[in-house]
Amino acid sequence: MPHRNAIIVCLSVAILLGIGIVMLTSTSVWIESEATRYTHLKKQALWMFVGLIGAWWLGSIDYRVIRKKRWIIYSAFGVSTALLAALYIPGVGHTVNGATRWLKIPGVGTFQPSEFTKVATVIAIAAWFAHYQSETKNFLKGFVFPSIILGLSAGLIFFEKDMGTAASLGAAGLCMIFVAGVRLRYILPSVVAASYVFWQFVQADENRSNRIMAFLDLEAHKLGYGHQQWRGLLAFGNGGFSGSGIGNGAEKHGYLPFSHTDFIFPMIGEELGWVTFIVVLCFVGYTVFGFMIAIRVNDIFGRLLAIGLTTIIVIPAMVNIGVTTAMLPNTGLPLPFVSYGGSNLVITLASVGLLVSIHSRSKVNTGSDSLTVKGGLIDTRI
């Protein structure tokens, strides 16, 4: 079997990790004191090491073993949703900038349960369709129950005011449900209804609605809710095509908030210029060849899991790039593999390892896009 798909996926991730470390070195030094200089870089390097070990281990095991342990899959999903629910208990969650999205583990630090939940949800949905693969056209087993799995996790994330993560997880889950072959007459009305409810909640939240208004007229809100995006655009303008050079960016000096996390992409534009195109190209490569891995898989669990593992990384990346270039309202999502953050980095690298495992143990699907099961055919949309 050609290894081109996995090689390009891994190469794309390696380039993004390298750019992330370089830019974190450049940006984080300005938010630290002399005594704590490079603390963020050291932490990120440690989490990268942990994530790479996890990716190597997951890449070396047979992903089909996971499918056979359905009780482990649903237990992991239950634990992840329980951790999300724990954030709603006063005094349990760790609050940053008005949002309670983190849990503290003694001796380890804080982590975001939503990152673990994303992968647990994707695996649970893939396992459901693998178990009921002849029921994908059935309303209850093919649509309602998988939607409950997705809605439970996305809903818990949504109501902790992490609407960007909830929306990206919802989109990834819908991609899996669509690819599984669920009837469009079930999917489309639910998408419309969910979009309407999402919009109503956004309008009811003063902070979110103000971000929408700022997005629509950034010039008028450049000193308020549109400040981050405005400064981000200035960073791109300052860098131009060639960039100002590593370490020479001006916006990181307190002008652009969160320049080492959510808004690290404009800093790449300011200091490295055209390298932003490399970043975008890496995510395009990850998307295309992640889907190529899914197409080559001849079992529905592996195919849907590959789709899910690809989309839960690519969709937040698209949103982050859209936000930092003022093409989307500000949502506060990190750029996978590049932004500072241990939870996101470890989980995304683990996802890559699992995707490599799917590739290395898949067989070439030489027939149609149908999967054979118990003498029949299961139609998927890729």
Image (cartoon, grey):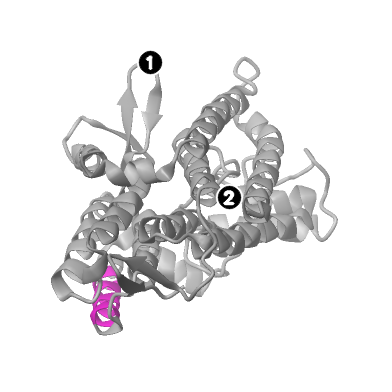
Question: Is 179 or 34 nearer to us in this picture?
Answer: 179
Left or right, residue 338 beside residue 117: right
Query: Marks 1 and 2: in contact by CB < 8 Å?
Result: no
Residue drawn at 27 percent across, 41 percent down: 69
**Mark 2 residue type:** Phe
Residue drawn at 29 percent across, 53 percent down: 127
Q: Is residue 123 visible?
A: yes
Residue 177: numbered disc:
none
Residue that mark 2 sits on: 263
Tell me where the magenta segment starts and ends, as one range. 186-199
Question: Is 278 or 321 nearer to us in this picture?
Answer: 278
Can you give x and y, in whole percent of width and height, for residue 372 in the image? 36, 67
Q: Is residue 178 above or below residue 345?
A: below
Left or right, residue 375 beside residue 111: left
- Quote the CA–CA distance across marks 2 and 1: 29 Å
Can you give x and y, in whole percent of width and height, for residue 284 in the image? 63, 62
Can you give x and y, in whole percent of width and height, for residue 105 in the image? 33, 23
Q: Quadrant of residue 238?
A: bottom right
Q: Secondary structure at mark 2?
A: loop
Image quarter hosting the N terminus = bottom right
Callout 1 crowding tier (Cα within 10 Å): few <14, some 14–19, many ≥20: few
Residue drawn at 25 percent across, 52 percent down: 153
Q: Secondary structure at mark 1?
A: loop
Question: Is 250 or 92 nearer to us in this picture?
Answer: 92
Residue drawn at 37 percent across, 65 percent down: 176
**Most frequent secondary structure within the magenta stretch:** helix
Residue 107: numbered disc:
1
**Mark 1 residue type:** Gly
The stretch drawn in magenta includes residue 373: no
